[in-house]
Image (tube, grey):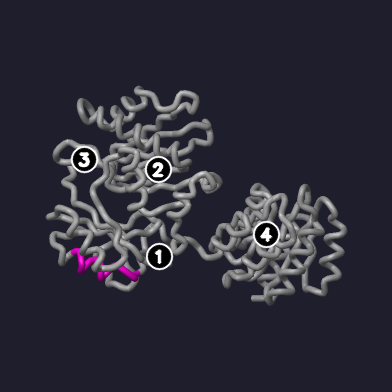
Amino acid sequence: MNIHEYQAKELLAKFGVPVPAGHAAMSADEAVEAAKQLPGPLWVVKAQIHAGGRGKGKFKELGPDAKGGVRLAKSVEEVRASAEEMLGKTLVTVQTGAEGKKVERLYITDGVDIAQEFYLALLVDRETGRVAVVASTEGGMDIETVAHDTPEKIETITIDPATGLMPHHGRAVAAALGLSGDLAKQCAKLLAGVYAAFQGTDASQIEINPLAVTADDKLMVLDAKVGFDSNAMFRHKDLAELRDLSEEDPMEIEASKYDLAYIKLDGDIGCMVNGAGLAMATMDIIKLNGAFPANFLDVGGGANKEKVTAAFKIILSDPAVKGILVNIFGGIMRCDTIAEGIVAAAKEVDLHVPLVVRLEGTNVQQGKDILANSGLPIVAANDLGDAAQKIVAEVKKAA
């Protein structure tokens, strides 16, 4: 689960991390009131969407010369003008894709006189099973670009969960950023606060870009992106309330209601599979046969008929889907349960696209019999390769 920048900064501030003063705003009037509560004379008006690259982004409804989603304002009037221009518009950035995201809220912050910019992030390093601290002197840039062009400017320091954050970690990060004296001490203290926030909220990532040194030699977080482990949200009811459903795909929201692992993709062949590894293999073999998957959907190992029906409806609700491939290996989940769910869903909705089903495992023959006797135009497949070839051929034939 992701949250907005203003929510991330409010969260970090609770753990003693220094952030500029700021207020969220849902309207131009609220933006003006927010600005009046800040000292000025310089304000920053920031569009709040779940994507990076906002400053360089462009609004669909505005001309190519219009400013992006992060703007400086030297008066309250300029704050109002920027707010009126941004709210309700669609911001397109390198991370949103061409469809962009609608700006429904803003963040008005104090302007900061910046002397230096750095990059700092905490994330889970799955290779080592530790929390990794990623630090770079190249703040304000896309870290992917830095990693590609100048990887030597990125330092990674891991923290053993058995010991937690130690003083030497703070010194190592300060050294990686070229900080000394009082700034090094501030860096160690800031890192301690960010680490406490990471651990205390079950975060999966905290990205600070940029982490700035101000003109008066203070370290301050100017932008923050925080994501949480969704599996731990039952422990954090307060954080779950920060979820902004307008930033998420409607089909992914619907899938979450049934505990389905669903991610919408750009292709046209819908996939319903049990098991993440098998789902990845299914998507790969679809691409191997010259087509592209429309989604990742893992119904899990213990799905019931209702869950399968819901999954099938979600796939069919995507207008981009031109065919569906169901690939099930029945271990814990029985093939007849999958078959009943497929038949029930197909009868409830208009099955207007080709459907290829490959079943294998527990009660496979019962499952095949249910599909064969359903009266539905279902194409049976013998194995995964056969299934991929058949769904690609069926989609081409229907085009």
- Residue 96 located within the stretch drawn in magenta: no
User: Mark 2 highlights which residue?
Assistant: 206
Judged by depth in the image, the label closer to the viewer, 4 or 2, is 2
Mark 2 to mark 1: distance in Å? 23 Å
Give the mark nearest the N terminus, 3 or 4: 3
Give the mark nearest the N terminus, 2 or 1: 1
Q: Nearer the viewer, residue 134 or 18?
A: 18
Q: Which image quadrant: the C terminus?
A: bottom right
Disc on res. 100: 1
Mark 1 to mark 3: distance in Å? 30 Å
Q: Say whether marks 4 and 2 touch (CB < 8 Å).
A: no
User: Mark 4 highlights which residue?
Assistant: 272
Q: Is residue 308 left or right of residue 202?
A: right
| x and y, in percent, of residue 309 in the image | 70, 65
Q: Which amino acid does label 3 sit on?
A: Gln
Mark 3 to mark 4: distance in Å? 49 Å
Q: What residue type is labelled 4?
A: Met
Mark 1 to mark 4: distance in Å? 27 Å
User: Mark 3 highlights which residue?
Assistant: 116
